[in-house]
Amino acid sequence: MALRAVSKRFGATQVLDGIELGIAPGELIVLLGRSGCGKSTLLRIVAGLSEPTSGRVEIGGRDVTGLEPRERDLAMVFQSYALYPHLDVASNIAFPLMIRGVAASERRARVEEVARLLGLEALLDRRPAALSGGQRQRVAIGRALVRRPPLYLFDEPLSNLDAGLRSRMRAELRALHARLGATMLYVTHDQTEAMTLADRIVVLEAGRVQQVAPPEEIYRAPANRFVAEFVGQPPINLIEGEVRGGRFVARAHAAPPLCALPGVPDGACVLGVRPEHVRVEPDDGAGALRAEVTLAEPIGDRTHLHLDLGGLALRATVGGRDAFRYREGDRVALGIDGAVCHRFDPRTGQRVS
Amino acid sequence: MNGALLAAVLASVTLWHSYQGAERAALEASIAQANAQLAREAQARGEAPVRIESLAIPFDALHRKLETAIPRGHGPDLFLAAHDRLGDWARLGLLRPLPEAVAARWRSRVLPGLAEALTDGRGRLLAFPFTFKGLVLYRNRQLVRDAPPDMAALEALAPAMRARGGWALGYDTGSFFFHAPFFLAHGARVFAEPPERGDPPPFAVFDRRARASYAYVIGLAERGVIPREVSSATLARLFEAGRLATVISGPWFAGQIDLPADRWAVSALPRLRGRRLGSFVTVEGLFVAASSRDVPAAVRAAQALLDAWRVRARRGLQPPVLRSAWRAPERAALPPLVAAQERALAHGRVTPNRPEMALVWEPVGRLLKETLWRGEPLEPALARARTALAIASRPPPPARDPAPWLVVAGVLLLGACGWALVRARRLHLVDRVRRERFPLLMSLPAAVAVALLVGVPLLTGVVLSLFAHVDGGFRFVGWANFVDLLGSRSYGPSDPLSFWFTLGVTVLWTAVNVALHVTIGLVLALALARTGLRFGRLWRVLLILPWAVPNYITALVWRGLFDTQLGAINALLGLAGLEPVAWFQRFWTAFGANVVTNTWLGFPFMMVVALGALQSVPRELEEVARLAGANRWQRFRHVEWPFVRPALVPAVLLGSVWTFNMFNVIYLVSGGEPGGATEILISEAYKWAFERRMRYGYAAAYAVLIFAILLLYGRFVLGGRERDAAVGPREVRA
């Protein structure tokens, strides 16, 4: 399926602005962005629940822009699950089949198959009110699966679940995708979901596509400041400054330079350093960059450190043997490897290679 | 209070009346004259003067106020009222008969017939004749320049009037009161001793001479002299429009005509075969109330007031009662409307005031409507009318000994108390009351209000249904009312006036209405619930509007729209080249008119309920259905309906109860026409209580049965709802 120059306005508000996107069959694409970035609107346009102001939607090479949802042959899973409270689980799952007039015996067979796949066999005659959040979510997914359409749409399906359940469902979804081999378009604001599930991630902001790339590339080569900042936990350090004679000097921090950038021409620059790329060692008095730990946040396998480098605030992550090594007030020596840093144009925010 | 003021208060005579407009102004002017006269007399005798003080009371309230105030001693000294309730008031002891000397003098002073109407069975004059009202002939002067001398002159007018889509003469053809001129002209009488063959005693309203009068007016209708169907409400409009050359009506009709004074005129009723038509005449009496503290003063004041009649005749257009007023030259000075009424009395008669008179109006009116309005043959209609009169005049059921009933009631009451005590003990009610004293105290006013406003009338109604109202008192009759009703003793089950027929109509009426209310309300709610509907709020307000208008106003508007002669609906049919429909002459059209009116009134409630429920349907549920491929009907059936249904169940229950008892629409739109066939139980009960000789016990039996039916229905519907709550709406099985 493909989106061609899709735009959407609500009155004076431009919600989507010229979205171009092509999806290969069998691909799992995650639309990632903050709330209000237009990702759900985009999904609803694909589903046919909402009309684009301009542009085209193609599914299977066919222009479906003006078609009703039922003519598009797709299924959608809603954040609220949208289960029918007056129907039991079996009827909820069978609902799309019943609407299409599928014979009762076949309906039953298909529901049982889906129930087996999702582990819902024991719950088939319960009402949604008698189910847990995870069970409801599985019923909602079952309802989408039962018709076996070539395209599935997921609108933040996991955001109403608690953390443990969410990670389990993530894994189940991934496995499901592998088994079905269907095309899926998945909307989330959660970067972990995006990174773990996606074949490719589409980062949306202010109605525009910021970057379309596999998770690794999103992380390793963010296309601009927004993507760099949005993906990664804790967030990347973005430091304004300039390159002078192959070295980066932060603006808020007179000297010494933060790192070497051999071969980079002089000029203003925003340097992006992921916290895990800030090397932290006990202060032996010899290093050029010496900072103070203002806050240490241990989370088990690693610790997030908030550092004060002569007035410049930096985030760093230490792990392994160093996980519990540093405390607030400790003085540390820092090292930054220029080779793994990202550089962005201070005016446009675009990546500079 | 100083002495002079006290004397003035004691010496004032209070007068209650219900006159309005010109009649009231004329009465007040004549009171001023009478007071001046009283002052002169008092001065001549050297006594303190007596003054008349008047109090105007709305017509509807006057009778009730008299009946409650006089026995308690705060009634008036004098009051003015029509003669027809005389018998009741005498029995209730509200009146003081006039002293014999005074009565003898007045009997000889007033026009013949008037004093007799105010005289009781023992020959006592119960009131001073004050004025009277009779029927006169109004004519449109552009169509008839001079007063038509006789019916032949009116018949001669008929062809010309027919050519312009009108008639020579109009009157309320469905009412015995307005038929009376023809009735009396044929020498017929209401009561006969002994009655002729066929009529139940002591009536003569269907005898040979009466029959001739009915045949005569049927002939008039067949020759196109009078319209077949016309109600009093449309007479004035037809008269103004020049479609009626003349109209027979009472003095009140003058106030309803919206024409310049030179375009119409009044004369005495015409002659029929040389004999002038007269009418039933209502006499207004000036009564001395039993509550009067100074009867001689009240009698003096009353006579002074009667002597000041000229201003009332000229300004209030009230015919004077004194013979002297009708001699030359006084007579020449009286306005034509006043003079014409005297002719109605001279050739007619005072409306009989025997209690049995109340039974005559409905059967005769029904006969006239069947034969004139619907063109049914006279003989079978007469037979039906005789039966109806016989049933209405049947003596009440015999008295029963209430003792066994009291014993049973006592045992039941004791049992209920015992059961309540056991329950209270088991539920530890005393402890709970002690713990929850404050909340219980707070709900006490509401509980008392419900007990008084619901409990007491309910209990009264149930008890009343075991009694019969006989001559102002109540007689215990046990089950007799129910046996009569349920056993169809009065009318066969297929007769429109039988309980079972009316029950069938009521059930049909309720089912059709509620089905239409729900369907229309639901469709409109679905249309309004659509997001992005243009002028959505405006539509919503417009569609709720029928609900905001008081239902009797709506009913009257629709009654006007369905009017045969002047209604907008027949006018539209005419524009479309169709024949006008006499809506209230056939059962299905009359029923349909009622249903249309009540549907107009009822759908907004269902619409509001359904709209509320629809707005609680989560948007995603709709979208899931759209994605699944559901069409509009499937989306409604599987998504919206399950949400709307639980809200509609109580609404349907309420709507059914309201419709089952929708008195206003039936009473005001079809009025039960044709022949009581579109009557529902509640309006039938009303007729038994207030239009057929006050058969309160019989009407109460209707009310008890209505209550029982609705109670069972409510249990059934709500029972179904509880089952629903247990298993939910109908399942869509996989």
Image: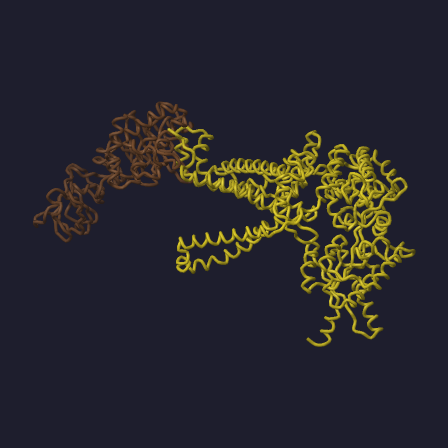
Answer whether residue B610 is visible to the viewer in this image.
no
* Location of residue A322 with respect to A66 vertically, above or below: below
Describe residue B7's horizontal placement relative to residue A205 as left or right: right
State the residue in front, A94 or A266. A94
Chain in brown in the render? A
What is the residue that sits farthest to the bottom in this orientation?
A: B3
Answer whether residue B374 is visible to the viewer in this image.
yes
What is the residue that sits farthest to the right in this orientation?
A: B328
* Location of residue B239 with respect to A55 vertically, above or below: below
State the residue in front, B400 or A325. B400
Question: Which residue is rendered at x = 60% and y = 40% of the image?
Answer: B598
State how the image is colored. by chain
Q: Quadrant of the C terminus of chain B?
A: top left
* Location of residue B591 with respect to B479 vertically, above or below: above
State the residue in front, A12 or A189. A189
**Image position, residue B684 (x, y; %):** 64, 43
**Image position, residue B694 (x, y; %):** 68, 49
Chain in yellow in the render? B
**Image position, residue B5 (x, y; %):** 72, 74
Describe residue A322's horizontal placement relative to residue B718 as left or right: left
Describe residue A71's horizontal placement relative to residue B510 as left or right: left
* Location of residue A253 with respect to B155 vertically, above or below: below
